[in-house]
């Protein structure tokens, strides 16, 4: 039995009190992974952005809004976990200035200066010590190459590669990639089936290793 931290869902970066930037993530893959991990007998802690999926009741859920909040909640939880599965789609940019009042329309273009938010998987990967980290990569071109670059850059043990068709879909097609560049598995099916197989690989290669 392991204690697994999952980051799941999108994050929001507010521009003003009512408008925000976000990512098109439903949280379904995170929810399916949480279900598969609970079914395999693991303890699951989820740090989730705003989603409408129902996480398994056996999991502990910490709700967050922004990428910075997701990072600090995940970092706090990671200290007591054996590994991280980073399936969230955190918003990679935030406005440099957040307006206190709703921005009024002027008929002119609105220019926003955006700055990068921290990368949660990369930050926790760099601090992981004897814990394991599984990342997800959604790529549209040079898919395997880009996913392997991220695997290395973010100090992951496995990287799950999926395409944009995964967004807001019940189905998924993924490749699980290892540090040596090998394709550990190619999985096609519902997100539930994909999640069970990913958890089986995580169990064999990272938890019981
Ligand atoms: O966005 P990108 O394709 O680089 O995401 C790859 C991995 O990094 C995913 O596992 C995602 O959860 C994670 N990530 C993160 N924090 C970010 C951006 C991505 O943890 N700010």
Image (cartoon, rainbow, N blue to C red):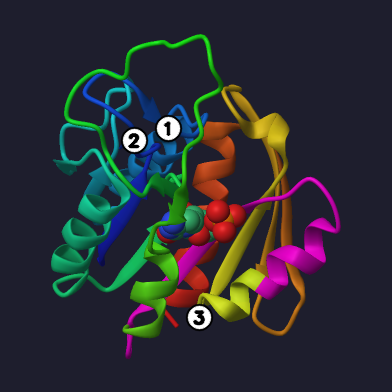
Q: Nearer the viewer, mark 3 or mark 1?
A: 1
Whole-number angstrom distance, CA of label 1 to CA of label 2? 6 Å
SS assignment at label 2: loop
Residue 191's x, y, as percent?
A: 56, 33
For marks 1 and 2, the one nearer the N-term is 2
**Which residue lies at the image location 80% right of the left edge and 68% below the top edge?**
145
Q: Which mark is residue 12?
A: 2
User: What residue is pinned by disc 3?
Assistant: 155
Q: Quadrant of the C terminus?
A: bottom left
SS assignment at label 3: loop
Say above or below: 99 vs 168: below
From which residue to which does the magenta span run? 128-149
**Which residue lies at the image location 36% right of the left edge and 43% below the top edge?**
8
Front-most of residues 195 and 77: 77
Residue 31's x, y, as percent?
A: 37, 35
Q: Residues within 10 Å of mark 1 (few under 14, many from 20)?
A: some
Whether residues under marks 1 and 2 lie with C-beta atoms below 8 angstroms apart, the answer is: yes
Q: Residues within 10 Å of mark 3 (few under 14, many from 20)?
A: many
Magenta stretch contains residue 148: yes
User: What residue is pinned by disc 1?
Assistant: 21
Q: Quadrant of the N terminus?
A: bottom left
Whether residues under marks 3 and 1 lie with C-beta atoms below 8 angstroms apart, the answer is: no
């Amino acid at each position: 039995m392991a204690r697994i931290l999952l980051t799941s869902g999108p994050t929001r970066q507010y521009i003003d009190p009512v408008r925000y930037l976000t990512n098109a993530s439903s949280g379904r893959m995170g929810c399916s992974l949480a279900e598969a991990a609970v079914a395999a007998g693991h303890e699951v802690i989820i740090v989730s952005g705003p989603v409408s999926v129902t996480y398994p009741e056996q999991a502990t859920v910490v709700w967050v809004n922004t990428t910075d909040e997701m990072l600090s909640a995940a970092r706090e939880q990671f200290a007591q976990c054996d590994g991280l599965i980073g399936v969230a789609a955190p918003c990679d940019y935030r406005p440099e200035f957040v307006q206190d009042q709703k921005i009024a329309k002027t008929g002119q273009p609105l220019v926003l200066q955006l700055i990068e938010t921290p990368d949660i998987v990369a930050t926790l990967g760099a601090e992981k010590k004897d814990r394991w980290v599984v990342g997800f990569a959604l790529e549209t071109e040079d898919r395997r190459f880009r996913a392997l670059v991220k695997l290395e850059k973010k100090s992951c043990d496995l990287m799950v590669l999926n395409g944009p068709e995964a967004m807001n879909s019940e189905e998924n097609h993924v490749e699980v990639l290892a540090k040596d560049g090998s394709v550990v598995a190619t999985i096609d099916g519902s997100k539930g089936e994909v999640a069970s197989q990913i958890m089986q690989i995580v169990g064999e290669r990272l938890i019981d290793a």
